Amino acid sequence: MELKTKIHAEDGKQEIFIIREFDLPVEFLFKAYTEAELFEQWMGTKVTKFENKQHGSYRFETSNPQGEVVFSANGTIHEIVQNEKITRTFQMENTPFPVQFEFLEFEKLTDETSKITIQTIYKSIDFRDQMLKLPFAQGINMAHNRLQEIIQKLEAGN
C-alpha cells in the first residue's frame, strides 16, 4: 500500500521534506498540531507542555503499558502564524540525535482540503541518513492517517 505521507530526501543534503494532503480545512489541520488534546490523540503520546507562542516550548513523552517512559522529545517554538506556519526546534531526549530545526507550512488547497509541508534540517547528512533508517516514514504516515480520521469525526459531530 502506498503511503499518503511522502518523505523526500535528496542525496547529499541535511534535510528532509514531509508532505501530506488532507481532506480537512486548513484550520483543522493547524489545530491538530497546536491543541494538546488533539495532538495526543493522533500522535499517541502524552503532552506535558505545549506553549504555542513565539519563544514558547513543548514537551511530550510516550510510555509503555507498564508506565515507563520509552520516548520523550522537546523543543522551542520560534515563530507561529495561525493556519500558516510553525518554526520550531525538535530534540529527541536520551538519543544520540542532536536538535533538529523544523519549518511546518500549512496550506489551504480548497475550503475542504489542505496540505502540510515539513522541512526538517539535521546537523549533518549522517544524522539525517540515520533518521531515515528508522521506521519513521511508516510511523508518520500512520499518525497522519489517525489525524485525518480523528478530525473528520470531530467535524462530523459539529
Image (cartoon, helix red, strand yellow):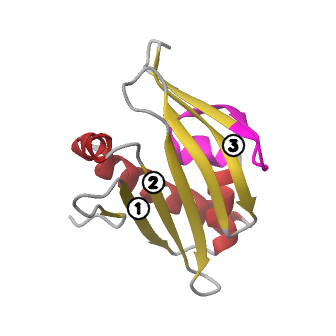
Question: Dividing the picture into quarters, in which one does residue 32 lie?
Answer: bottom right
Tell me which numbered mark, 2 or 1, is placed earlier along the sequence: 1
Question: Dividing the picture into quarters, in which one does residue 56 lie?
Answer: top right
Q: Nearer the viewer, residue 152 or 104?
A: 104
Q: CA distance from mark 3 to mark 2?
A: 21 Å
Give the secondary structure at mark 3.
helix
Coordinates of residue 15 in the picture (x, y in percent) = 37, 56
Residue displayed at 30% across by 42% down: 131
Residue displayed at 43% across by 58% down: 145
According to the picture, the residue beneath numbered tag 1 turns out to be: 18
57 to 68, vertically: above or below: below
Coordinates of residue 126 in the picture (x, y in percent) = 26, 42
Instruction: Give the class, few, some or many, for how many residues have Cα within 10 Å of label 2's Cα (few <14, many ≥20).
Output: some
Q: Nearer the viewer, residue 17 or 26?
A: 17
Q: Nearer the viewer, residue 4 or 137?
A: 137
Q: In the figure, is residue 25 to the left or right of 20? A: right
User: Which region of the structure is painted magenta?
Assistant: 37-57
Coordinates of residue 14 in the picture (x, y in percent) = 35, 53
Look at the image and say whether residue 43 sits in the magenta stretch: yes
Q: Mark 2 and mark 1 in contact? Answer it, CB < 8 Å.
A: yes
Q: CA distance from mark 2 to mark 1?
A: 8 Å
| Tag shown at residue 120 | 2
98 to 133, vertically: above or below: above
Question: Dividing the picture into quarters, in which one does residue 80 lie?
Answer: bottom right
Instruction: Give the class, few, some or many, for how many residues have Cα within 10 Å of label 1's Cα (few <14, many ≥20).
Output: some
Q: Quadrant of the C terminus?
A: bottom right
